[in-house]
Amino acid sequence: MMYRPFTKNGHNLWDVLSLLQKSIRRNDKRWAVWAADELDSKYHDTAWKRLLIITCEDVGELVTTQVLRNMRAAFLAKKNCRRIKFRIHDG
């Protein structure tokens, strides 16, 4: 039997990760935020890793640097048993 990971609302993990990447590429903030939120509770680290990959492949160095800062902050917060929610900023 093959293991199939599902998100908090029962969606296939790989489909939601794909949606996250495609929505960022298409500048569709609504779906990007939905996908990030869907991944946040159960696959928080996986979502951050995918965001790092997306920024390296599609966005650019400035954004990649910011994602790395956020990943570090998330790691430190997790270490201290706190959560950092995904934030999408305009501008």
Image (cartoon, rainbow, N blue to C red):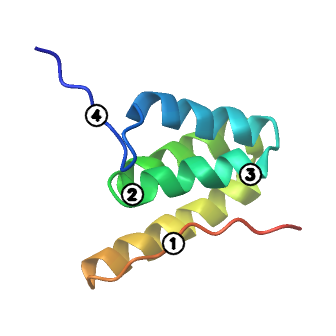
Q: Quadrant of residue 58?
A: top right
Give me the C-alpha separation between circle 2 and circle 1. 9 Å
N-terminal of the pair, mark 1 or mark 3, is: 3
Say which residue label 1 marks: 85
Q: Residues within 10 Å of mark 4 (few under 14, many from 20)?
A: few
Query: What residue do we see at 56% from left, 30% from top?
Result: 18
Q: x%, y% of residue 40?
A: 43, 58
Q: Secondary structure at mark 4?
A: loop
Relative to 41, is 56 on the left or the right?
right
Q: CA distance from mark 3 to mark 4?
A: 23 Å
Mark 1 and mark 3 residues within 8 Å of each other at the beta carbon: no
Kindly report which numbered mark, 4 or 2, lies closer to the viewer in this rendering. Answer: 4
Image quadrant holding the N terminus, namely top left
Residue depicted at 18% across the width and 24% down the height: 3
Q: Do labels 3 and 2 touch, CB within 8 Å?
A: no
Sequence-wise, the earlier of marks 2 and 1 is 2
Q: Amino acid at mark 1?
A: Lys
Q: Amino acid at mark 3?
A: Arg
Could you say whether the residue bearing mark 3 is in a helix, strand or loop? Answer: helix
Looking at marks 4 and 2 on the same chain, the residue that comes earlier in the sequence is marked by 4
Q: Residues within 10 Å of mark 3 (few under 14, many from 20)?
A: few
Q: Which residue is mark 3?
A: 30
Which residue is most to the top?
1
**Which residue does the numbered mark 2 point to in the structure image?**
44
Residue at image mark 4: 5
Q: Disc 3 and disc 2: Cα gap in Å?
A: 19 Å
Q: Amino acid at mark 2?
A: His
Residue 42 located left or right of residue 84? left
Observer-nearest of 82 and 53: 82
Question: Label 1's element?
Answer: loop
Image height check: is 56 above or below 12?
Answer: below
Q: Is residue 87 left or right of residue 84?
A: right
